[in-house]
Amino acid sequence: MAAGTRYAGKVVVVTGGARGIGAGIARAFVDSGAQVVICDKDEAGGRALEQGLPGAVFIFCDVTQEEDVKTLISRTICRFGRLDCVVNSAGYHPPPQWPEETSAQGFRQLLELNLLGTYTLIKGAVTAMTKALALDESQYGVRVNCISPGNIWTPLWEELAALTPDPKATVREGMLAQPLGRMGQPADVGAAAVFLASEANFCTGIELFVTGGAELGYGCKARVHTPTGAPTIPS
C-alpha cells in the first residue's frame, strides 16, 4: 500500500501536536493521506505547523480543560463529519527532581496533564488505563493502544539537557542508552502511531515500545550516591 493512501479519507486529532513528538505524529498521518487536526495550547506553534503542513488544521485546546476538549471534538466533527482516531500526545516532562522536592500541587498538575489529559508519560498508569479502556470500548468497535517512547530527540529533550551541568554529556548518555546507538526521532513515533491506527486492526490494549531497545540488556541502574557493597564470594 502506498504511504500516501495508508489512512486516506480518515480524520485524526493529535493533541500536543504543535511540536516535538506530536508534530512528528501529525506529519506522519498527513503523509498517510489523513486529515489531521492539530490540538495544542501553543497557538503560535500550532498555526505555524498548520501553514507548513497541507492537510492539517489547528484548533486551540488545553487538554486539562474539559470544555476545551468538548469544543475540540465538536468542531472536528462539524468540519469533517467524522473522527476516526485520536492520538493523545500532549504531555510534559519536568526537570529531574527527587520525590521529596516535588510539591503535591506540582504532582497533581503532572498527573492531570500526562495521565488524565493525554495518557502518555505516567507510563505504569498509562498501561493499566489502556488495558481498561480497551476492554470498555471494544463493545463499540474502538481500539485503544499506547505507545511508550524512549529517548526521542525533541525540543523538550534539548531544553532539559541544557539545564544539566554538562549538556553535551547528557545528550551523549541519552544516545548511548539505546543498543542502536542513537536517539529516536519524532518521525519514528509517528510511524508507530500510523501503524497502530491503519494496519494493526487486531491489536487493542497493547503497549508498543519505541525505544531503540533501551530496556534490553544490562545497564547502569544505580545512581552515583546509591550505597553499594562488595560482593561476597562463597567459601
Image (cartoon, rainbow, N blue to C red):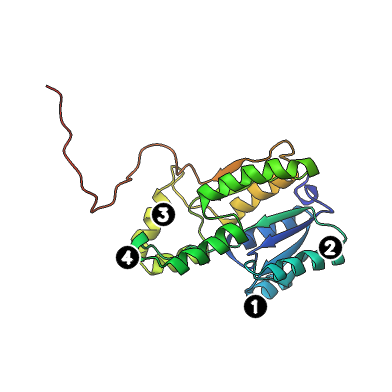
Q: Are marks 4 and 1 in contact (CB under 8 Å)?
A: no
**How much space separates mark 2 and mark 1, taking CA atoms?**
24 Å
Q: Residues within 10 Å of mark 2 (few under 14, many from 20)?
A: few
Q: Secondary structure at mark 2?
A: helix
Which residue in the structure is indicated by mark 3?
Answer: 174
Q: Earlier in the sequence, mark 4 or mark 1?
A: 1
* Amino acid at circle 2: Ile
> In this view of the protein, which residue sits in the foreground, 32 or 112?
112
State the CA–CA distance, disc 2 to disc 4: 47 Å
Location of residue 65 (image quadrant) = bottom right
Q: Secondary structure at mark 4?
A: loop
Which secondary structure lies at badge 3? Answer: helix
**Eyeballing the image, is 63 above or below 127?**
below
Camera-nearest label, 2 or 4: 2
Q: Position of residue 76 (x, y in %)?
A: 80, 65
Please name the residue that numbered disc 2 is placed on: 77
Instruction: Kindly identify which residue carries mark 1.
Output: 44
Element assignment for label 1: helix
Look at discs 2 and 3 and give the one toward the viewer: 2
Which residue is more in the foreground, 207 or 9? 207
